[in-house]
Image (cartoon, rainbow, N blue to C red):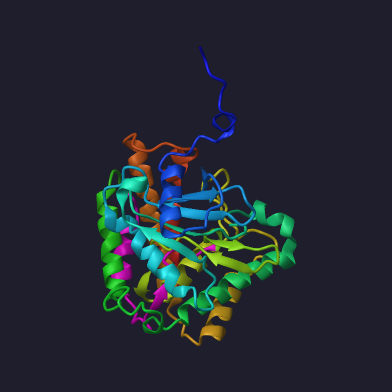
Amino acid sequence: MSSAPDPQSTTREVPPPGLDPERLRRLLDRERPGLVGGPLEARLIEGGRSNLTYAVTDGTAAGRWVVRRPPLGHVLATAHDMRREHRVISALRATDVPVPATVLFCEDESVLGAPFYVMEFVEGTPYRSARQLAPLGPERTRAAVLGLVDTLVDLHAVDPDAVGLGDFGRPDGFLDRQLRRWGKQLDASRGRELAGIDELHAALGRALPASPPPTVIHGDYRLDNVLVGPDDRIRAVLDWEMSTLGDPLTDLGLLVMYSTPLDLPGSPISTTATAAGHPSVAELVERYAARSGRDTSALSWYTAFAWFKLAVILEGIHYRYTLGQTVGAGFDRIGELVPVFIEHGLTTLQEG
């Protein structure tokens, strides 16, 4: 004799890999009684570069959260430090930097298979391409990008000691360590000759600038790592996995690199810099300098370093692709882009 099917079992979504809603519910009920109003459902939020991000809901208007955890099968805990992300977001909550409110951090791997944290869900859009920005029109696009600069100034104005982040990194020798780190990453991905990349690395080492006083830095600051609200204001800065104490101009150099228009037809790398109304690189730098009071005269080094860093990242993806260790749309073209980034790095450093 067969029993009638449970209506809930036929309508409940299949949970995504890496998150068990029932185990998460039991944890939240124990640690935050009354927070959850019903059975949880989860979906994986696409677009993450490394750590996994899930949207979770109990079906009510107020019951929406976000869960962050390391990728499945991760082995290097230091590369996916959930406690570190949770710490910096929690510390910045009381500042002018918009970040989601944190709910809890859990290092018990029996719950989801890895340490993770839960934070509030924030409404907003992570704009990833000029096409996505087009419906906003030039004026609104301009306002959103200028807001990105202003939020970066607010981040770099935070006193690390005042928010409990005085020991969040090792700012002494920061640039030298960064350059050596990415040089080692390059060596680990060498599968072909790349004209100019060793020249760029050496030139950066010879021209190492003196860093300004250290600040909390994001490490991957760009438009698609923030949520922009319907009012075109930055609602939340996301993806803090590379944050530390260091040279604030590394954030600005990376933002300048991502704000440089590139003609890469068919490229898997999207850019917002070609959107109508997007401020020029010069205007972004001038706004940052005026609002922060920092000297940006050495910014060409930081921007060249950003080109080098992304060239190394892309070469790593290309190397793994040639070994059959990664698949995805457009990965077959990643290798073509690496020389473009090397050339931009060399040109930026030579011409300032």
- Of residue 150 and residue 19, the one placed in the foreground of this image is 19
Would residue 272 appear left or right of 83 to someone viewing this image?
A: right
Task: Say if the magenta span includes residue 300.
Answer: no
Q: Position of residue 84 (x, y in %)?
A: 35, 65
Would residue 17 appear left or right of 76 to someone viewing this image?
A: right
Residue at position x 40%, y 75% in the image: 216
- Of residue 114 and residue 350, the one placed in the foreground of this image is 114
Residue at position x 35%, y 81% in the image: 211
- Of residue 129 and residue 20, the one placed in the foreground of this image is 20
Residue furthest toward the bottom?
A: 293
Q: Position of residue 85 (x, y in %)?
A: 39, 63
Q: Is residue 260 visible?
A: no
Q: How many marks?
A: 0
Would residue 111 appear left or right of 101 to someone viewing this image?
A: left
Residue at position x 49%, y 77% in the image: 94
Q: Position of residue 325 (x, y in %)?
A: 33, 37
- Of residue 150 and residue 88, the one placed in the foreground of this image is 88
Start-end of magenta stretch: 194-222
The relative height of residue 193 versus residue 220 in the rendered view (above or below) is above
Q: Is residue 183 visible?
A: yes
Residue furthest toward the top?
A: 1
